[in-house]
Amino acid sequence: MDRMDFLNLQLEMEKAGEAYAVITLVRASKNTPRSTGKMIVCPDGRTVGTVGGSGREQAAVKDALACLQTGQNAFRTYRLDEDGAGQGEECGGEIDVYIEVFGAKPLLVMVGGGHVGSALLPLAKTVGFSTLLIDTRDPELIEQAVKAADRFVQAPAFDQGVKEANLAENAYVVIASYGHAEDGAALYQALQTKANYVGMIGAPRKINTIFGHLREQGVSEEALARVHSPIGLDLGGETPAEVAVSILAELLMVKNGRSGQPMKTGVGQ
């Protein structure tokens, strides 16, 4: 794999919000087969690239997987002893590697590419979210939202798009499609996932109606309590841009485990 392929793979993983580590060979003795090299290590053990092979590379991969668990970078030295010497290698060779961890980005799953979705997607990216847009419409009809998203899925139905996304715990689902029935179906599927946040745009009457339908489908009160709806913090805005800011504020509040209270509360008292 050449340098551009390696960088493009990193870019793809960044856009997908995936966690990975990069092992960089920073020093090698004369008794080692390579003087430079890089590897990508995925949490499931998959690797791309090489830092020289042999037991030293295996040890580096093991340490990279440990670093992915802790989220900490590391500098490691590996020495080739007599038992580890391979063909064409002398005992005593050393390599130094730097292991850099790239954690999984939080994923904004925007269900609906309307006015609010078009405003929220670019804002979320500025604070580190990877973004996925799910919509049933032709991309030309929601061009602004499609261009703002890292990924776009044109699904036959919103609920099917949410279901097939296989959302993990780093997902933050915002539901704002073009109809109450569509929102309700998408919400049902979102509640079947382990998403860290599930929010839906709507006035109290709409929310009560949808919650009633979900109860009839067997959705528990505990599950419904997960839903942030009406969505966002009470900032008083009405325009799509203002609503998007209030939603993003709530996403950050949940992600960072904070209260959403004014910073000045209690200061000087």
Image: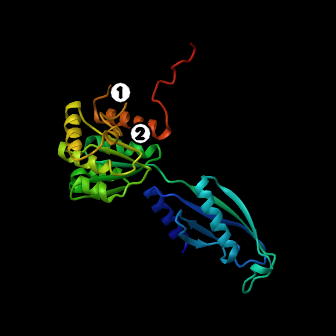
Left or right of residue 9: residue 185:
left
Q: Which residue is mark 1?
A: 234
The residue sitting at the bottom extreme is 87
N-term-proximal mark, 2 vs 1: 1
Q: Residues within 10 Å of mark 1 (few under 14, many from 20)?
A: few
Q: Nearer the viewer, residue 4 or 110?
A: 110
Q: Nearer the viewer, residue 19 or 30?
A: 19
Q: Give the residue displayed 26% in from the left and 43% down from the top.
A: 176
Regarding residue 179, the answer to whether it shows in the image is no
Q: Amino acid at mark 2?
A: Leu
The residue sitting at the top extreme is 269
Q: Nearer the viewer, residue 254 or 121?
A: 254
- Quadrant in the rendering for residue 32: bottom right
Across and down, in percent, residue 33 comes to: 71, 79
Regarding residue 263, the answer to whether it shows in the image is yes
Q: Amino acid at mark 1?
A: Asp
Q: Nearer the viewer, residue 119 or 19?
A: 19
Q: Is residue 141 above or below residue 240?
A: below
Q: Give the residue displayed 21% in from the left and 40% down from the top.
A: 210
Q: Give the residue displayed 50% in from the left and 54% down from the top.
A: 104
Q: How is the image coloured?
A: rainbow
Looking at the rendered structure, the secondary structure element under dot 2 is helix
Across and down, in percent, residue 213 comes to: 19, 42
Across and down, in percent, residue 244 comes to: 34, 37
- Quadrant in the rendering for residue 238: top left
User: How far is mark 2 from mark 1, CA to CA?
Assistant: 13 Å
Left or right of residue 124: residue 265:
right
Q: Residues within 10 Å of mark 2 (few under 14, many from 20)?
A: many
Q: Which residue is mark 2?
A: 251
Across and down, in percent, residue 109 comes to: 35, 49
